[in-house]
Amino acid sequence: MDPSAPISDEPPRPSRRPRPLRGLAWLVGAGLLVSLTAWWAAGLARERALGDLRQIDSETMKLVVSNLRVELEKLEFMPQLVARDERIQRLLERPGDPELVAAANGYLEEISRTVGASDTYVMDVGGLTLAASNWASDASFVGQDFGFRPYFKEALEGLAGRYFARGAASNKRGYYFACPIHRDGQIIGVAAVKVGFEAIERTWRDLPGPIALTDWHGIVFATNEPGWLYRSLRRLDERTFAEVNRSRRYSGVVLDPSALVEIQLIDGTTSRMTVLAARDGAGGPRRPGAEYLALSDDLPEYGWVIYTMSSLRAVDGSVRAAAALGAASAGLLALAAFFLAQRRQYRRQRASFREREQRMLRRNQEELERRIAERTADLMRSNQQLQKEIAEHEIAERALRDTQQGLVQAAKLAALGQLAAGVTHELNQPLTALRSYADNARLLIGRQRLDEAARNLERITRLTDRMASITRHLKTFSRKTGPDRREPVDVVRALEAALSLVGVGGADGGLELLHAKPAEKLLVLGDPVRLEQVFVNLIKNACEALAGAERRQLSIGYRAGEEAIEIEIRDSGPGIRREHLGRVFEPFFTTKEAGEGLGLGLSITASILGEMGGSVRAGNHPAGGAAFTVALPRAVARAQARSA
Ligand code: ADP
């Protein structure tokens, strides 16, 4: 598993309902709650306020009705009192007597003032007023004919007449009580008393709501509401309108048949009244559109209906207030519920988030631990493997070293054995030369050619030196000893010495030597003897290769570079076989007959050159024959040599 791969957790589960939908549900729920509460509170408030108003109206009603009854009833029996009075009786007997008129007038005036009646008066059977309490005023009843008045007609029939009307002479509304005046069983006149409404109305002024006293048709004739007087609560149909006008009850008033209010009956005595705007706009009622809760009570003995009213504005206000309060409370409640729900949900979410987070952390930790354990195990395994491999390597190396050492030792021993046998081969040439030089020296001494003999002896000395050095080199081949000599060696001279050692250059056996000597002196650093040995080996091999050749040619060439010098020794022999090219420098590799070659020459050559910082390579020339190229670093770089 890739340790860098993120440790993923399961994706968060979707909540039960999509968020916007839940919000909408909340909103709808809250709206419903608010509306319902507002509606319920409004209903409750309306009920309550209406109840209160009804209560107020009913209290007002009681007060107003009892007051009205008292005001009226206290004068109900006054006409009978007047009818029995002697002065009235006498006046009716002699209606034209001014004294009697004056006495009657005085009496009526006084009694009227005493009881608080509006007017008190006496009529003859024809309806003519003979005496009246208001005899002295401008609107005196005296001499007026009230024969058309229903109360007069009733009284004339012997009944107790009572009637409401607007005074034809006084233009004042009043309630009339009348009774017949008897004398000896005969009706001789009618006594009447008028109760005014001004005083009654005055007592209504301070009441908060409108009071309306209406006749049977609904025409208001007493009220504390300006503009309502002589208006009908209900619309008057034509017949009623004509009848009312005919009765002259409201003489002098132009009646309006349209309805003053719109009435919605709530129950038998309770109704809702809305004041209608006046049709003509002028002289209409106050506050058109005002609404009232009206309570009605019948006064059947008078043929009236009385209304006490309370403005519904307060109700509407309190209903609105209650609705608002209810809505606000419900809204608050909803808000609180919403807040609580949100908080709960938030807490739940937070808890679940924490739980998930912890679960994830735990899982990550476990995963991490598992990976670490895996990794550790892997590492331990590879470590163990490595240790095992190291141990194996060490064993193998030791075995290899042992084997190598064994091999080296064995090879050395073998080489030594073979060397012992091959020393002859290496020393054969100088020995042969020694012998011939010695023989020659002996002959020369015998012929007294001492100088030449001395030269030969010198050569012999040099040869013995060389032989000693050869043995030393053979020794160093198996065991390296002593420091090497390093001195500038003339390459061409070393080569010439080698040629001379091998015996090439003379007119021997038809070997053609092509030695292209360089113009400059080529110096390399090293041991001159050993360099000579290198060239001896190479030249000797070339000569041996040329042994059976038709054309025996040995070419020696030089290539002088800036830093190094190359010497090519080429023969016209058979060349080196392809498969042997890579092996000729191996120690003891030889293609020669047993006893002829040891296979050490090239190996020693390579070894010597290596020690001198140079190298040798073998190859075949395109024109035929083997070519060995020796490369050696210059003792002094060419530039230095030039400037020196
Ligand atoms: P040896 O001469 O004793 O065989 P060397 O090490 O001198 O040992 O040479 C190894 C072999 O390289 C030779 O046996 C021969 O096969 C091959 N060789 C060396 N020089 C030449 C040459 N000039 N021409 C052809 N073969 C050569």
Image: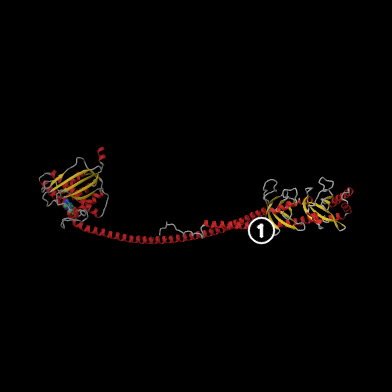
For residue 613, side relative to residue 543 (left or right): right
Query: Residue lying furthest left in this view?
Result: 447
Q: Position of residue 50 (x, y in %)?
A: 69, 57
For residue 59, side relative to residue 536 (left or right): right
Q: Position of residue 129 (x, y in %)?
A: 83, 50
| Of residues 574 and 308, the one drawn nearer to the viewer in this rendering | 308
Coloring applied to the structure? secondary structure
Q: Quadrant of the N terminus?
A: bottom left
- The residue under the point 10% across, 50% down is 550
The answer as to whether callout 1 falls within 8 Å of ligand 1 is no
Q: Is residue 312 among the parts visible in the rendering?
A: no
Q: Is residue 254 among the parts visible in the rendering?
A: yes
Number of labels in the image equals: 1
Query: In this rendering, is residue 344 above or below 636?
Result: below
For residue 231, side relative to residue 364 (left or right): right
Q: Quadrant of the C terminus?
A: top left
Secondary element under disc 1, as helix, strand or loop, is helix
Amino acid type of the residue that numbered disc 1 sits on in the rendered structure: Leu
Q: Position of residue 623 (x, y in %)?
A: 15, 48
| Of residues 452 and 341, the one drawn nearer to the viewer in this rendering | 341
Q: Position of residue 567 (x, y in %)?
A: 20, 46
* Mark 1 residue crowding within 10 angstroms, few (<14) / some (14–19) / many (20+): some
| Of residues 376 and 518, the one drawn nearer to the viewer in this rendering | 376
- Pointer 1: what residue? 44
